[in-house]
């Protein structure tokens, strides 16, 4: 446990919080910690109200003594042992006292989980900065799929984590992606379609317009470049649901090239060369790249923005599509 963490925090409920729920009081008094983390501490019995274990929804009367066993709570919520430090290369674009901006390569899983117990970006982050083991999710604010490349942000402190998580919930992140989709789009647009867990394929997400459990999902897109049978699309996220871009593009019948989960059968346009067909078939991951990330710095309030160049395999795919367009334009 870091030596700058207090073992126990005690405070008296201020009069201006009378009638508020205890978790709201905690969120105000312990603003370095996220609301969800404080609620978990309440559930786990690490918070006492006048010496008694309270409920999350209990309302305060003012003047009570609140005791939070910070050190024990953090010890209890430490990450599992598979968050071991591992010397894995990280492409760090930017780093200061509050943030790490990473350009994640294709094939790197962000968090340890079933099938990927180690060798993840989290293992690399804990190796780079051991203190991240005490931050929720090792400081990672938003994830990218294993086979999606590009920019993501990691918080180095609890204060930065709390602030960035709130910005993400408030849709204050500027997130732009590039995708290569099947089909020739006629123009840009917006997909406003709720996304939830697929009712029968539990590893997939789906557009579920009539489901009470589906969450609002909004994706904006515009054309970057048209090809003979494909389109390079610039995508901007308003929300950030799991697999959102992949699900939404498939929903409007422009699935992402190489997406084994949502794209269905590969579409081969007529009169394609063997080289073109082979190039499409050899692209084995979704052609999706997180190009840009921007937000107000959680400590300074200054707007900052980072970009990552499209990875080589997507650049080669665009070259292939461009050559196919030229070959058929000359016929």
Image (cartoon, grey):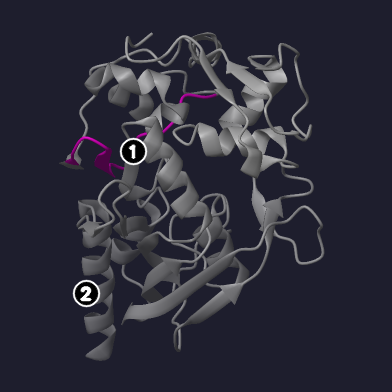
Is residue 310 rendered magenta in the image?
Answer: no
Going 23% across and 58% down the picture, which residue do you hit?
304
Looking at the image, residue 237 lies above or below residue 191:
above
Looking at the image, residue 11 lies above or below residue 28:
above
Q: Is residue 144 visible?
A: no
Decide which of 96, 272 is in the foreground and name it: 96
Looking at the image, residue 261 lies above or below residue 46:
below
Residue 204 picture location, percent across and down: 64, 47
Going 78% across and 25% down the picture, which residue do you hit?
55
Circle nearer the viewer, 2 or 1: 1
Count the marks: how many?
2
Is residue 110 rendered magenta in the image?
Answer: yes
Whichever of labels 2 and 1 marks the residue nearer the N terminus, that label is 1
Q: Is residue 269 visible?
A: yes
Task: Give the residue pinned by disc 2.
Answer: 323
Going 54% across and 18% down the picture, which residue do you hit?
10
Residue 305 lies in what quarter of the image?
A: bottom left
Question: Does dot 1 land on a helix, a strand or a loop?
Answer: strand
Q: Which residues are magenta?
A: 95-113
Judge from the rendering whether residue 170 lies leftward or rightward of residue 296; answer left or right: right
Main SS, magenta residues: loop
Decide which of 17, 316 is in the foreground and name it: 17
Q: The N terminus lies in which quarter of the figure?
A: top left
Judge from the rendering whether residue 268 lies leftward or rightward of residue 128; answer left or right: right
- Distance of mark 2 from mark 1, alpha carbons? 39 Å
Decide which of 311, 2 is in the foreground and name it: 2
Residue 88 picture location, percent across and down: 24, 23
Task: Give the residue pinned by disc 1.
Answer: 154
Mark 1 crowd level (few <14, some 14–19, many ≥20, 10 Å Cα): many
Residue 242 picture location, percent across and down: 56, 49
Q: The C terminus lies in which quarter of the figure?
A: bottom left
Mark 2 crowd level (few <14, some 14–19, many ≥20, 10 Å Cα): some
């Amino acid at each position: 446990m870091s030596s700058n963490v207090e073992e126990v925090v005690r405070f008296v409920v201020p009069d201006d919080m009378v009638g508020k729920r205890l978790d709201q009081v905690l969120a105000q008094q312990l603003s370095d910690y996220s609301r969800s983390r404080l609620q978990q501490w309440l559930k786990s019995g690490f918070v006492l109200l006048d010496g008694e274990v309270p409920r999350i929804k209990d309302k305060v009367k003012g003047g009570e003594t609140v005791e939070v066993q910070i050190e024990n709570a953090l010890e209890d919520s430490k990450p599992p042992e598979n968050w071991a430090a591992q010397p894995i290369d990280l492409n760090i674009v930017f780093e200061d006292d509050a943030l790490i901006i990473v350009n994640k390569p294709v094939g790197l899983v962000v968090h340890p989980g079933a099938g990927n117990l180690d060798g993840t970006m989290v293992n690399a982050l804990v190796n780079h900065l051991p203190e991240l083991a005490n931050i929720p999710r090792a400081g990672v604010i938003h994830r990218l799929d294993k086979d999606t490349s590009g920019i993501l942000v990691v918080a180095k402190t609890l204060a930065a984590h709390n602030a960035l998580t709130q910005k993400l919930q408030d849709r204050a992140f500027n997130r732009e992606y590039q995708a290569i989709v099947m089909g020739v789009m006629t123009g840009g647009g917006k997909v406003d379609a709720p996304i939830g867990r697929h009712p029968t394929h539990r590893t997939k997400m789906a557009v579920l317009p009539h489901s009470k459990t589906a969450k609002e999902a909004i994706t904006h897109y515009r054309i970057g470049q048209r090809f003979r049978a494909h389109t390079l699309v610039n995508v901007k996220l308003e929300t950030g649901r799991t697999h959102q871009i992949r699900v939404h593009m498939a929903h409007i019948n422009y699935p992402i090239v190489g997406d084994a989960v949502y794209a269905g059968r590969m579409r081969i346009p007529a009169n394609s060369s063997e080289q073109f067909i082979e190039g499409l078939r050899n692209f084995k991951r979704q052609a999706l790249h997180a190009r840009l990330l921007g937000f107000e710095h959680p400590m300074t309030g200054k707007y900052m923005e980072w970009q990552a160049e499209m990875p080589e395999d997507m650049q080669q795919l665009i070259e292939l599509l461009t050559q196919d367009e030229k070959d058929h334009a000359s016929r």
